[in-house]
Image: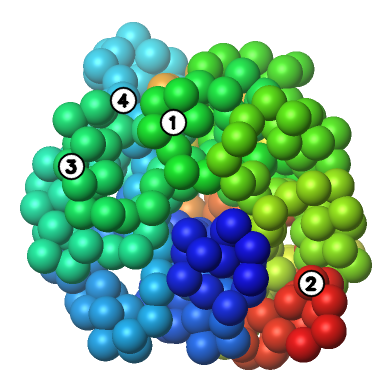
């Protein structure tokens, strides 16, 4: 037991990272069974689907984490959208698709009053946020339930801001982490640092518990994070090939190949930097192409290209999210993966 396990109500100070689009409640339940905090990502779930998944978590009787994005939706920009579709035009032509026929719109929704309405009867033990914290009135509502609030920081300044604005613990997300960067105070990627550089600086700057995330794939990584002062760890990529994950067969094959040794930050799939294994569109357009609209508006135009090529058995336009260390990503049950990770905390 330590400060973090007391907050989370878990046996181990380990959080299974919420991975939108790659999991539902099944993964969270399996991680929770082994003593970690399972997480449910809700940014891509419709209200009905969210409630179905939450019902499964509630029935388990174990603590769980409900995760949301809390970005400010951008104003539509017709000129930027046109430039983005022009950049993708050769790919539309290749498959005979008229870009004018494609709908526009967001691919991920931020935490809202409607989401809070759905959660209030459940009063989940833990809520976590990516891209800062929700509006003060929404955060106050969550805190009034007695829920523990976590959020990601990618810099020391963000960690200090989160503590000052009500976070009960901070997730120090290093540059190695797969998926979306959690930055929110600055979009300058040169301010981002690796987990083991960021972690001790965040620990020195805040009083709340600090959770290390990014590049931790096995018990040795857990031990290293704890030795640097982490109160706990969050792990995502290691779970992506578990049977409980909803990762596609194409994505799993890449994660378990030598290709996963090389990852890049890219804005092409959503408009915001996220780490994944390079594929055709990243190589040909450049992973950080400025034509991509603001998050999450880039998704709408690239989605039909992804769908077309996935039907052909190709991941040319698929976001292959992965951290820099995919060595722990294996086809084992999530409970087994969890038990292997917690060996890093000491004798079981």
Say few, some or many: other residues with alpha carbon within 10 Å of mark 4 (under 14 / 14 to 19 / 20 or more): some
User: Distance from label 4 to label 2 (Cα)?
Assistant: 38 Å
User: Distance from label 1 to label 2 (Cα)?
Assistant: 29 Å
Residue 183 in percent (x, y) is at 56, 28
Frontmost residue, 14 versus 77: 14
Q: Quadrant of residue 167?
A: top left
> Is residue 93 found left or right of 58 in the rendered image?
right
Up the image or down, 123 lies above or below 304; here it is: below
Say few, some or many: other residues with alpha carbon within 10 Å of mark 2 (under 14 / 14 to 19 / 20 or more): some
Label 1: which secondary element: loop
Label 3: which secondary element: helix
* Disc 3 to disc 2: CB gap under 8 Å: no
Frontmost residue, 46 versus 218: 218
The C terminus appears in which quarter of the rendering? bottom right
Q: Quadrant of residue 2?
A: bottom right
Q: Quadrant of residue 124?
A: bottom left
Residue 235 in percent (x, y) is at 66, 62
Identify residue for label 3.
141
Residue drawn at (46%, 24%), measured in percent from left and top? 164
Say few, some or many: other residues with alpha carbon within 10 Å of mark 1 (under 14 / 14 to 19 / 20 or more): many
Identify residue for label 2.
345
Which of labels 4 and 3 is toward the front? 3
Q: Residue 132 bears which disc, if any? A: 1
> Is residue 255 found left or right of 302 in the rendered image?
right
**Considering only order in the chain, which callout, 2 or 4, is on the residue closer to the N terminus?**
4
**Considering only order in the chain, which callout, 1 or 3, is on the residue closer to the N terminus?**
1
Identify residue for label 4.
72
User: Distance from label 3 to label 1 (Cα)?
Assistant: 16 Å
Which of labels 4 and 2 is toward the front? 2
Residue 145 in percent (x, y) is at 21, 54
Residue drawn at (80%, 48%), measured in percent from left and top? 229
Label 2: which secondary element: helix
């Amino acid at each position: 037991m330590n400060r973090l396990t007391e907050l989370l109500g878990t046996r181990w100070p380990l959080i299974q990272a919420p991975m939108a689009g790659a999991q539902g409640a099944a993964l969270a339940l399996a991680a929770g069974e082994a003593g970690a905090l399972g997480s449910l990502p809700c940014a891509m779930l419709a209200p009905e689907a969210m409630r179905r998944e939450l019902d499964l978590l509630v029935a388990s009787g174990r603590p769980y984490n409900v995760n949301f994005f809390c970005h400010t939706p951008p104003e539509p920009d017709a000129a930027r959208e046109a430039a983005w579709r022009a950049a993708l035009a050769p790919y539309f032509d290749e498959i005979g698709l008229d870009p004018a026929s494609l709908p526009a719109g967001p691919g991920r929704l931020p935490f809202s009053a409607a989401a809070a309405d759905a959660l209030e009867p459940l009063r989940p033990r833990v809520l976590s946020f990516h891209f800062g914290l929700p509006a003060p009135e929404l955060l106050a509502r969550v805190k009034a339930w007695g829920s523990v609030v976590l959020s990601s920081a990618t810099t020391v300044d963000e960690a200090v801001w989160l503590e000052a604005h009500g976070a009960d613990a901070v997730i120090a997300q290093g540059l190695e982490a797969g998926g979306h960067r959690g930055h929110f105070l600055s979009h300058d990627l040169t301010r981002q640092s690796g987990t083991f550089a960021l972690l001790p600086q965040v620990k020195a700057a805040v009083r709340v518990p600090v959770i290390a995330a990014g590049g931790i794939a096995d018990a040795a990584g857990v031990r290293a994070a704890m030795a640097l002062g982490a109160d706990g760890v969050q792990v995502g990529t290691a779970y992506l090939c578990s049977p409980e994950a909803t990762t596609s067969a194409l994505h799993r094959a890449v994660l378990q190949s030598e290709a996963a040794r090389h990852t890049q930050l890219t804005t092409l799939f959503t408009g915001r930097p996220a780490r994944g294994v390079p594929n055709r569109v990243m190589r040909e357009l450049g992973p950080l192409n400025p034509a991509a609209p603001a998050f999450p508006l880039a998704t709408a135009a690239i989605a039909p290209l992804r769908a077309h090529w996935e039907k052909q058995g190709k991941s040319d336009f698929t976001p292959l999210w992965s951290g820099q260390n995919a060595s722990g990503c294996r086809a084992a049950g999530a409970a087994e993966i969890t038990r292997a990770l917690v060996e890093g905390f000491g004798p079981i």
